[in-house]
Image (cartoon, rainbow, N blue to C red):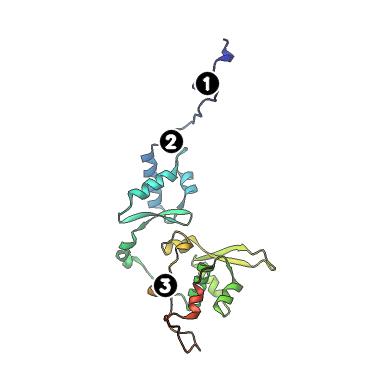
Amino acid sequence: MDETDNPPPGAGPGGPPPRETLFEAPPAGEQERMVEAILFASAEPVTLADLTARMPHGCEPGPALEALRRRYEGRGVRVVRVGEAWAIRTAPDLGFLMRREVVETRKLSRAAIETLAIVAYHQPVTRAEIEEIRGVGISRGTLDLLIEMDWIRLGRRRMTPGRPTTFVVTQAFLDHFGLESARDLPGLKELRAAGLLDNRPRPGDGSEPEDGTESGQSALFDEE
């Protein structure tokens, strides 16, 4: 048998040789440490794509993230998912310890709170749809304020006459309220307890519903 009949080194019978890489990926434990370091040092949540780009060739941050999340269960901080990204955050039951570190820079107006709620519960939603749900017009300044705070952003344009722009909540909004996605938004009771709902009746409304909830505000949080 001549040299051309000899199979390549490492090749199995009838099959190609195993794929060789120039660099060997770090051990799983080392990859977990890398992910931990990146999440700890990052001010913003980090996506899997960002982790892959930062880590050495051949690393798989997905399994490392899952292992890290399990290791942090029951600890003072947790590895949590925020939208399509990941972050290290204080355990919810220890949030009261951080209250002194929180500085309230501004208080949202009633119009801004209602607009934010409509966007969160009905996204993607257009300006006209926001006004229809609220029953009143909305100033451009209200939307600009929420965009400036990075709590809402422009979404895709509707394929309808005029191609109106839609609005959706941002990853910063989800991160601020400790949500993985918009599906985890709280209900009416949680919103009132957090002071985000006003129990006063709307002007001109002489009565309240039997359950003590404003009918106008209830409509804001009806999921489609």
Q: Which mark is residue 216?
A: none
Residue at 57 percent across and 13 percent down: it is 3
Q: Name the residue under label 3.
A: 191
Q: Which residue is depicted at the point 40% across and 47% down?
A: 66
Looking at numbered disc 2 in the image, what kind of residue is underneath it?
Ala
In terms of secondary structure, where does tag 2 sit?
loop
Q: Which of marks 1 and 2 is nearer the N terminus?
A: 1
Callout 2 crowding tier (Cα within 10 Å): few <14, some 14–19, many ≥20: some
Q: Is mark 1 on a helix, strand or loop?
A: loop
Judge left or right: residue 164 versus residue 121: right
Foreground of the two, 48 or 120: 120
Residue 14: x percent and y percent? 55, 22
Residue labelled with disc 2: 25
State the image coordinates of residue 77 (x, y, percent, origin top left): 33, 55
Q: Determine which quarter of the picture holds residue 128.
A: bottom right
Q: Mark 1 points at which residue?
A: 13
Q: Are marks 3 and 2 in contact (CB under 8 Å)?
A: no
